[in-house]
Amino acid sequence: MVALLLGACSDPAPSPPPAPSTATTANASTTTIAPVTNVASTIPTVRPTTTVAPVAGPAFTGTASAVTAADLGASWRPGCPVAPDDLRLLRLSFWGFDDQPHVGSLVVAASVTAAVLEVFHTLYDQRFPIRRMEPVDVYGADDDASMAVDNTSAFNCRPAVAEGPPHWSNHAYGLAIDVNPVENPYILSGRVLPPAGAEFVDRSVYRPGMAVAGGVLTSAFAAVGWGWGGTWSNPDYQHFSSTGG
């Protein structure tokens, strides 16, 4: 009888909570993932990211040293618009297309040394690939020969390759740099310079080493106030300069 009374007075066992309804589950998912009705319209053209990623490998190094006329070889001569004292030889780390770190050389104006070091430090941190980096004197100051091997270069005492009256190029002042000329050709009145750059005339699909609006390369130069020839009526995708010309 006692046992019966105790059982009658006990609280009933709690019922298990109801399982979530299908409607609740569906509502939870739609708050985070919206249905896509037109996939093609939501996928942007592929462009390289500008987000800095951790770099595995040695740290970036960049040094500047004075140069003489002898150091500049065929790339300088009396009558050039700048003297050797106005130029500097930079030794810079860069990542190659082999995904390995290398050290190359550029000759630039002394006045832009800090800006150029900053640009190539950024490119190194972003692992932007560069084919090779040698002073144009290695190619006898022949711009066509330098471009043909995809060489990134800067100073060269030469006239501008452009339409109109002859005038000094910004390269003759050490104020311009051409990066990966094959991946970033100069298109002058239908001519592709260098000719090997013909396969990169179509800029709609990004490939390693290319200069594109908002990409790693153009953003690095824009951050120090340099202009890009890729926006010209005769686009010079390889060309960056401190004056914009």
Image: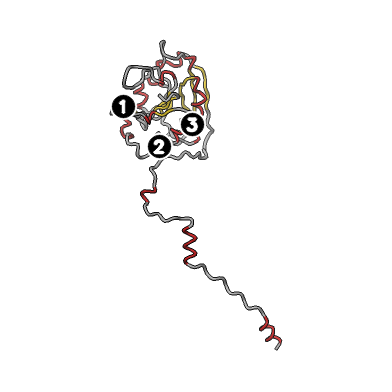
Quadrant in the picture for residue 77: top left
Quadrant where the C terminus lies?
top left
Q: Is residue 150 left or right of residue 19?
A: left
If you read the primary sequence from the N terminus, does the residue marked by circle 2 or circle 1 appear first?
1
Q: Label 3: which residue?
A: 223
| Residue 188: mark | 1
User: In percent of the image, x 45 and y 27: which residue is there?
Assistant: 226
From what the image shows, is residue 230 above or below residue 143? below
> Of tags 2 and 3, which is closer to the observer?
3
**Mark 3, secondary structure of its residue:** loop
State if disc 3 and disc 1 touch (CB < 8 Å).
no
Residue 241 seen anywhere in this rendered image of the structure: yes
If you read the primary sequence from the N terminus, does the residue marked by circle 1 or circle 3 appear first?
1
**Mark 1, secondary structure of its residue:** strand
Binning the other alpha carbons within 10 Å of mark 3 as few (below 14), some (14 to 19) or many (20 upward) gives: few
Q: What's the CA distance linking mark 2 and mark 3?
A: 21 Å
User: In percent of the image, x 36 and y 49: which residue is there?
Assistant: 40
Q: What's the CA distance linking mark 2 and mark 1?
A: 23 Å
Q: Label 2: which residue?
A: 208
Return the x and y of residue 73 as percentages of the image width and height.
42, 15
User: In percent of the image, x 40 and y 37: which residue is there?
Assistant: 208
Q: What's the CA distance linking mark 1 and mark 3?
A: 27 Å
User: In percent of the image, x 36 and y 26: which residue is there?
Assistant: 147
**Mark 2, secondary structure of its residue:** loop
Q: Amino acid at mark 3?
A: Ala
Q: Residue furthest left?
A: 190
Q: Nearer the viewer, residue 83 or 139?
A: 83
Quadrant in the picture for residue 201: top left
State if disc 3 and disc 2 touch (CB < 8 Å).
no
Q: Amino acid at mark 2?
A: Pro
Binning the other alpha carbons within 10 Å of mark 1 as few (below 14), some (14 to 19) or many (20 upward) gives: some
